[in-house]
Amino acid sequence: MDGPTGEVHLRVGLDEDGCPTIRFRLYDSSGRLAAESGGLESFPSGLTIHSGDGELLLDIPAEPDSHIQYRLYNRNGVLLTCSDGVSTKIRALLRMEAGGPKGPGAGARRATGPASKTEGLSTASSS
């Protein structure tokens, strides 16, 4: 989540059957909106999104045991976080929350700060 604005860029969760669901709003490194989902959706065939200049912004593999890769920018083109599927780098403007059954932020644990490793369920940034 974008710390100052509260805009959610990526939310990963599970539906009642245990299937992964994803919601995203992706900007490129220039701050242009590159892609947006309509809400929490399932992508059983996988999904790959690149920016207009070819940068990988989101890769959701079809294989259930594979790792999601992403680069999340805010609307100003500032890199908030990136993950190669194994480690995640967090920048200063990012706020992460672990949502619970009551919705976003229920029982949230927040991680903020530069260049640390973490896993999270939703990420948002500030402009």
Image: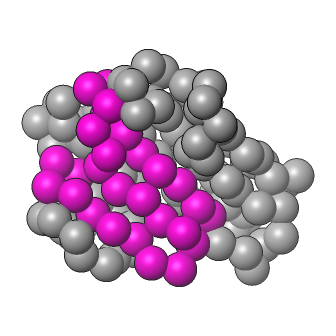
Q: Quadrant of residue 63?
A: bottom right
Q: Quadrant of the N terminus?
A: top left
Q: Where is residue 42 in the image (x, y as percent from the top left)?
A: 73, 48
42 sits to left or right of 90: right
Q: How is the image coloured?
A: one colour
Q: Which residue lies furthest to the front in this view?
A: 53
Residue positioned 42% across, 59% down in the render: 82
Above or below 83: residue 122: above
Q: Where is residue 58 in the image (x, y as percent from the top left)?
A: 60, 48
Residue positioned 77% across, 61% down in the render: 61
Q: Position of residue 86 (x, y in %)?
A: 53, 80
Q: Residue furthest right?
A: 45
Q: Position of residue 54 (x, y in %)?
A: 65, 37
Q: Which residue lies furthest to the top in this view?
A: 32
Q: Nearer the viewer, residue 20 or 113?
A: 113
Residue positioned 24% across, 75% down in the render: 116
Q: Does the magenta stretch include residue 72?
A: yes
Q: Nearer the viewer, residue 54 or 10?
A: 54
96 sits to left or right of 56: left
Q: Quadrant of the C terminus?
A: top left
Residue positioned 32% across, 46% down in the render: 79
Mark count: 0
Q: Does the magenta stretch include residue 45?
A: no
Above or below 80: residue 96: below
Q: Quadrant of residue 60?
A: bottom right
Above or below 43: residue 53: above
Above or below 3: residue 15: below
Does the rendering let one see residue 106?
no
23 sits to left or right of 41: left
Which stretch appears magenta? 68-95
Does the rendering let one see residue 48?
yes
